[in-house]
Image (cartoon, rainbow, N blue to C red):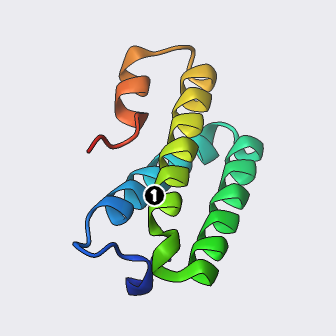
Amino acid sequence: MHTAGERTQDGTDAVREYVALDRALRRLEAKDPGQSAVLRLQLNRARAAYLKAGPQGEQTYTELLVVLHAACASALVEVEGGSAASAADARPVTR
């Protein structure tokens, strides 16, 4: 799903955040497919915009991944009953 063209200069920030977000979205999909679909659609739009913008859109793309991951983490906490462990597992990657 993730292509080499989406990698950052050093190959870390966007890739790490994308992988963490994808993992969280898969967990959310098992609990709330509708919310997962909404967030995945937003992710696909962000990826399309990044691919269209090229390297100059890299920082914005990474920032959008962080925002989407935070939204996914919040949704996971909500559907899993506010579990602290869920929040820790789903939180965005810090740099």
**Residue 24 image position (x, y, % from top left):** 48, 45
Number of on-image labels: 1
Q: Pointer 1: residues within 10 angstroms few (<14), some, or many (20+)?
A: many
**Residue 57 image position (x, y, % from top left):** 52, 70
* Residue drawn at (58%, 41%) of the image: 28
Q: Name which quarter of the figure residue 5 lies in.
A: bottom left
**Residue 12 image position (x, y, % from top left):** 26, 64
Q: Is residue 92 left or right of residue 74?
A: left
* Residue drawn at (42%, 26%) of the image: 86
Is any part of residue 27 visible from this angle? no
Where is mark 1, residue-wise? Answer: 62
Is any part of residue 74 visible from this angle? yes
Q: Name which quarter of the figure residue 52 lies in.
A: bottom right
**Element at label 1:** helix
28 up-or-down from 14: above or below = above
Identity of the amino acid at label 1?
Answer: Thr
83 up-or-down from 65: above or below = above
Q: Is residue 80 left or right of residue 11?
A: right
* Residue drawn at (36%, 76%) of the image: 7
* Residue drawn at (43%, 25%) of the image: 87
What is the residue that sits farthest to the left in this orientation? Answer: 10
